[in-house]
Image (cartoon, grey):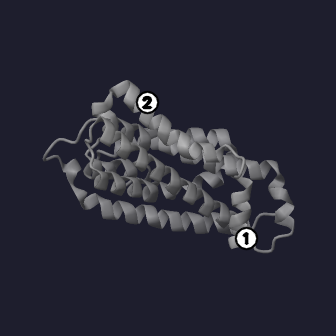
């Protein structure tokens, strides 16, 4: 399996995916700084990050990774590799590591921005928020990989943005917040005190209740495992 991962990493050496990793979080922070000012930097940047730019970011490098393989017909490996599932699993792992990396880059950037322009979210809460975003978005990686195989990269990215923005904003503040696409936005309410619409959570609001964090994480984790297994089984049965 390590050889497959090394192979996937080498393929990314000169790809745009490596640029997306740091460009998306940096752009998010710069936009918040320019449009909202230093005082609202952290809250505004987090809001744009988890509703639009992070979903767009990781869906792009997920879709581009699969689309590149499709274009090259997977370099003929489907005809010679016995354990084809390892090809798929290696891409899931690589994209998951990319998601973790871009979340950590955002955390470092937003923490430095807070120190420079005024801290409204402390570093501990910010770190927990970044970890939660990684966990609760990771389940979408095998899903969008599968979608890219079926409908292509452009339509996959569009569907991802519609689901992550539209569903999150509407459902995260409702009783059915447990719908998977709305979980990241709902968990940010008690973690950093920012609603999906960018406003601060009111003191005493039920949006402050941290009881949603554990079930949200468990749902996302189980989805990641189930979708990884399901899509891997599907890929294993593919013909050359």
Query: In the rendered view, does 69 fall on the left or right side of 125?
Result: right
Q: Name the residue under label 1.
A: 3
Q: In which quarter of the image is the C terminus?
A: bottom right
Asked whether disc 1 touches disc 2, contact meaning CB atoms under 8 Å apart, the reply is no
Q: Can residue 163 be seen in this view?
A: no
Residue name at image x 27 percent, y 32 percent:
39
User: Alpha carbon of mark 1 to alpha carbon of mark 2: how far?
Assistant: 40 Å
Is residue 134 positioned above or below 45 on the image?
A: below
Residue positioned 30% across, 35% down in the render: 117
Q: Which residue lies furthest to the front in this view?
A: 116
Sequence-wise, the earlier of marks 1 and 2 is 1
Element type where label 2 sits in the image: helix
Residue 43: where, in percent of width, then height?
31, 39
> For this rendering, which residue is in front, 67 or 93?
93
Q: Is mark 1 on a helix, strand or loop?
A: helix
Residue 88: give x, y in percent of width and height: 68, 63
Where residue 77 appears, as percent x and y from the top left, is 83, 64
Q: In this rendering, would 103 be left or right of 76? A: left
Q: Which of 39 and 132 is in front in this view?
A: 39
Label disc, if present, on residue 169 of the rendered structure: none
Within-10-Å neighbours for mark 2: few <14, some 14–19, many 20+ = some
Q: Going by the picture, which residue comes out furthest to the left?
A: 204
Q: Which mark is residue 31?
A: 2
Which residue appears at 81% of the width and 70% of the height? 81
Asked if one can make out residue 211 in the rendered structure from this viewpoint, the answer is yes
Q: Picture coordinates of residue 12 (x, y %)?
A: 70, 52
Q: Which residue is drawn at 75% across and 68% down?
A: 237
Residue at the far top in the pictured view? 35
């Amino acid at each position: 399996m390590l050889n497959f991962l090394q192979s996937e990493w080498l393929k990314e050496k000169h790809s745009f995916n490596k640029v997306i990793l740091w460009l998306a979080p940096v752009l998010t922070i710069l936009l918040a700084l320019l449009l909202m000012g230093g005082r609202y930097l952290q809250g505004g940047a987090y809001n744009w990050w988890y509703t639009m730019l992070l979903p767009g970011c990781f869906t792009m490098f997920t879709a581009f990774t699969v689309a590149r393989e499709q274009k090259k017909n997977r370099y003929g490996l489907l005809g010679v590799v016995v354990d084809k599932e390892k090809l798929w699993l290696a891409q899931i792992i690589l994209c998951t590591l990319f998601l973790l990396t871009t979340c950590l880059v955002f955390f470092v950037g937003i923490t430095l921005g807070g120190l420079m322009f005024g801290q409204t979210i402390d570093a501990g809460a910010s770190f927990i928020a970044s970890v939660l975003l990684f966990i609760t978005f990771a389940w979408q990686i095998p899903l969008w990989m599968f979608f890219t195989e079926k409908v292509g990269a452009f339509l996959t990215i569009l569907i991802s943005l519609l689901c992550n923005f539209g569903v999150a904003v509407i459902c995260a503040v409702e009783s059915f917040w447990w719908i998977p696409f709305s979980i990241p936005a709902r968990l940010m309410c008690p973690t950093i005190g920012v609603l999906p619409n960018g406003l601060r959570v009111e003191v005493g609001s039920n949006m402050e209740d941290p009881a949603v964090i554990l079930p949200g994480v468990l749902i996302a984790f189980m989805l990641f495992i189930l979708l990884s297994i399901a899509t891997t089984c599907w890929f294993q049965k593919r013909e050359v």
